[in-house]
Amino acid sequence: MAVSTETAYVDPEGGSLMGLVLLGRRHAGKSSVGDLILGRSEFEPGKKTTRCVRRFGWVDGVRLAVVDTPGWSLFGLADTRLVKQEILRSVILAPPGYHIFLLVVPVDSFSKRDARAMEKYLGVLGDMVWSHTLVLFTWGDELRGRSIEMHIQKNGEPLQEILRKCGHGYHVVSNKCPEDFTQVTELL
């Protein structure tokens, strides 16, 4: 993929920053998580993301570049080629050096089909992507008092395999409590 100077990374304020790239299926809550992380409405939750969108902000003294990506579909509702192209483009929009891929997974369900889709779409970034990926469970309020560990165990081998690939790194956020900024501080 050719890189133009229009899409190449430029930090508007100079200095170093951390990049967070939001990846996941459609309706996983990527845009909502982007807003939650930045503490303000920057993305368009509920509206289909068709191209990568990058926004900047400060969280606890850390300069962030948050990149929202189009979601893939398990049922052929998204253009596979375009989604893969945008996932590759997300790396260009993230700051060079220190960036983390947040694999956004709603706690409602996870299947073998979800795991295969994740491997397929993250595969365009190469095998090293997994060592820079953290699973970010969204809609944590849906756990209804169960621990995330119980949830992971209940969802079985497909989810456990994805977590193994990510070095068992995960975090849970509640989309219904955007004013609870401690969940973002803990994530960072």
Image (cartoon, helix red, strand yellow):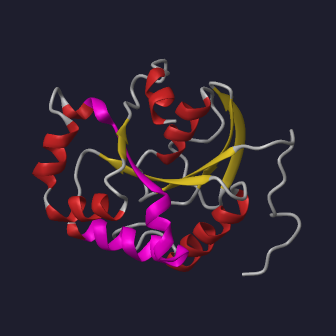
Q: Position of residue 93 (x, y in %)?
A: 72, 58
Residue 120 left/right relative to 13 = left
Residue 17 left/right relative to 183 = right
Q: Position of residue 51 (x, y in %)?
A: 65, 61
Q: Position of residue 188 (x, y in %)?
A: 52, 36
Q: Which residues are magenta?
A: 113-141
Q: Quadrant of residue 50?
A: bottom right
Q: Is residue 150 magenta?
A: no
Q: Is residue 115 magenta?
A: yes
Q: Residue at 33% across / 47% down in the picture? A: 106
In this rendering, the answer to whether 126 lies above or below 118 is: below
In this rendering, the answer to whether 8 lies above or below 59 is: below
Q: Quadrant of residue 57?
A: top right
Foreground residue among 8 and 28: 8
Q: Position of residue 41 (x, y in %)?
A: 63, 31
Q: Quadrant of residue 151?
A: top left
Residue most extreme to the left: 154
Residue 16 left/right relative to 45 = right
Residue 51 left/right relative to 130 = right
